[in-house]
Image (tube, rainbow, N blue to C red):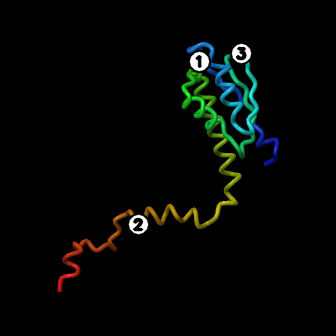
Amino acid sequence: MSASDLHKQREILFSKFPPGQLPEAADHLEQVEQVEVALKLDKRAIEVAYDLRQHTLEELETRLRDRGFHLDNTLMSKLMRALIHYVEDTQLHNLGAHDRPLKQSHEAYIQAWERHPHGDRDETPPEWREYK
């Protein structure tokens, strides 16, 4: 995967209401390191450019929602966002697939095994185990 594949340029569309939220949202995103922001008032959108290794569109949208901004919720916007989130997650997964240490992948199985009742537990109450 080349560096140009990791540099993303996306538009975040906003709802009509409340009016005037775009400049404030752009100011908020400009505070995020390594994110370039440009207003597109005619489209009610903010164009963001970022490196996928640093940020994802889903993360940036979550930041905006957490601050009370209202994104466009038309069906087409939701479908496009879901597709972009999926593609970016897949790219990140493919980037880290070879670098992931083996120990970390087994930790989830170890924790699941410890919580799963698999017959090697002594169900006897502690006071009965020590009875002599």
Residue at left 68%, top 55%? Answer: 96
3 and 1 marks in contact (CB < 8 Å): no
Q: What crowding class fits label 3: few (fewer than 14 Cα within 10 Å), some (14-19), or many (20 or more)?
A: few
The answer to which of marks 3 and 1 sits earlier in the sequence is 1
Would you place residue 95 above or below residue 62 in this image?
Answer: below
Judged from this view, the residue extending furthest toward the bottom is: 132
Q: Position of residue 102 (x, y in %)?
A: 61, 66
Would you place residue 112 above or below residue 49 in this image?
Answer: below
The mark closer to the camera, 2 or 3, is 3
Residue at left 78%, top 39%? Answer: 7
Callout 1, which amino acid?
Ser
Res. 41 mark: 3
Structural distance between the alpha carbons of marks 2 and 1 = 47 Å
Residue at left 20%, top 75%? Answer: 127
Q: In the picture provided, is 110 more to the left or to the right than 121? A: right
Q: What crowding class fits label 2: few (fewer than 14 Cα within 10 Å), some (14-19), or many (20 or more)?
A: few
In-front residue for pair 101/127: 127
Callout 2, which amino acid?
Glu
Quarter of the image where one finds residue 87 = top right
Would you place residue 131 above or below residue 10 in this image?
Answer: below
Res. 15 mark: 1
Q: Position of residue 95 (x, y in %)?
A: 71, 52
The answer to which of marks 2 and 3 sits earlier in the sequence is 3
Structural distance between the alpha carbons of marks 2 and 3 = 54 Å
Residue beneath disc 2: 114
Secondary structure beneath label 2: helix
Q: Quadrant of the C terminus?
A: bottom left
Callout 3, which amino acid?
Leu
The answer to which of marks 2 and 1 sits earlier in the sequence is 1
Quarter of the image where one finds residue 58 = top right
